[in-house]
Image (cartoon, rainbow, N blue to C red):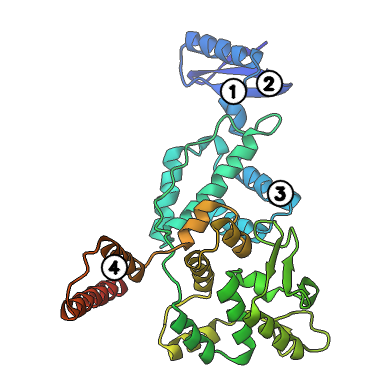
Amino acid sequence: MGTITKRGNNYSIQYYVGGQKFRESTGSPKKAVAVKLLKLREGEVARGKKPEIYYDKIGFAELAQDYILDYKLNAKKTLAKAERIVRLHLLPFFGNCPASKITTTRVKQYISHRMDQGAANGTINRELAALKRAFNLASRCTPPKVSGTPYVPLLAERNVRQGFFEHDEFLALREALPPYLKGMVTFAYKTGWRVGEITGLTWNQVDLNRAVVRLEAGTTKNDEGRTIFLDRELVDVFKEQFRNRQLGCLYVFHRNGNPIKDFRVVWRRACKEAGIQGKLFHDLRRTAVRNMVRAGVPERVAMAISGHKTRSVFDRYDIVNLRDLEQAALSVERYLGDSPGTPAEAAGTKKAHNLMLAQNEGASHEG
């Protein structure tokens, strides 16, 4: 049974939830207001609903702690990233705030704060996803730690993947790279594997007699195993790596017997020498997907080789560039029989195509 007391000019109510005492001010000097509020709270308790003041005692820091614990218990590979998001961004902004006070308005203030710091939309969205996940975990607890999850708006992202290599660009880059990276980039160019999957590849995952390379389930980003067959060029690459292996080194691709780690400086220098500044190693992954699709490899098979788990992600790598569009226009023109009648007209049409292509590509680079 709850009680009503008067403190100063205003009335307060006192009631129990699960044996725990709660005191709440009505903010009113009228006893009738206190009676009405007490009946409301007692009704909520009788229905098993916790009053809002119950949740005010649970701070966001507790939700963040549970969020990190969930990553640890499930052995998630992105634990370090989750810890970094919580430690550097979410806790400094929300840490002292009761979870019940984190509303959509407060979330929007966080978004504005991070934008002022220069964070990209994609980066902010990853942080908002962590925030939402923390609330979802809290709502599933027994008893729940929050009464509800605030609406968390996400920002628009321009996440269309644009970087890829034409074959002559790849050859120029490979020529400019030091020997220990040549085989590695060739493998990436052909398979589309992630850099961590390639640098972590060991000889016990390679069967040179059958020209097969395997990644075991649980070792990849999507936790699924993968098996690929090496073409003749890659067989030669692996044979060369085997000849150059060093005692005690388990890695297929290495630098003087040591794992290949940060090679960004070497990469940028090679790109500059090849005249293709701004290229990323990840562009090799995009290129491999595009090349497989162009070569007629079924998309399901291409996904199995590159390790793309979802079609939506895979589609973002199958990039169409201006040359693809030009080729499509010429193909339709040939099919419809609308090609110019004389060699001079054909040459003029081709010249116009090339001029438009150069202008468009120049504009896209400037943008």
Query: Where is residue 80 drawn, in percent x and y?
Result: 65, 61
Residue 317: image tag: none
Quarter of the image holding residue 137? top right
Is 351 left or right of 268, judged from the image as shown?
Answer: left
The quarter of the image holding the N terminus is top right
Question: Does residue 312 appear in this view?
Answer: yes
Which image quadrant for residue 7? top right
Closer to us: 44 or 75 = 75
Q: Secondary structure at mark 3?
A: helix
Query: Which labelled disc corresponds to residue 17?
Result: 2
Residue holding disc 4:
330
Q: Tag 1, which secondary structure?
A: loop
**Residue behind mark 3:** 69
Q: Earlier in the sequence, mark 1 or mark 2?
A: 2
Residue at position x 62%, y 64% in the image = 305
**Residue 51: mark in rendering:** 1
- Neighbor class of circle 3 (other Cα within 10 Å; few <14, some 14-19, many 20+) is some
- Please state if 53 lies on the left or on the right of 324 as rendered: right
Q: Disc 3 or 1, which lies upstream in sequence?
A: 1
**Spatial separation of the CA atoms under disc 1 and disc 2:** 9 Å
Kind of residue at disc 1: Pro
Q: Amino acid at mark 3?
A: Leu
Give the foreground label among 3 and 1.
3
Q: How far apart are the two marked residues, 2 and 4, measured between alpha carbons?
A: 76 Å
Give me the C-alpha separation between circle 3 and circle 4: 58 Å
Is disc 4 placed on a helix, strand or loop? helix
Secondary structure state at the residue bearing disc 2: strand
Q: Are marks 1 and 2 in contact (CB under 8 Å)?
A: yes
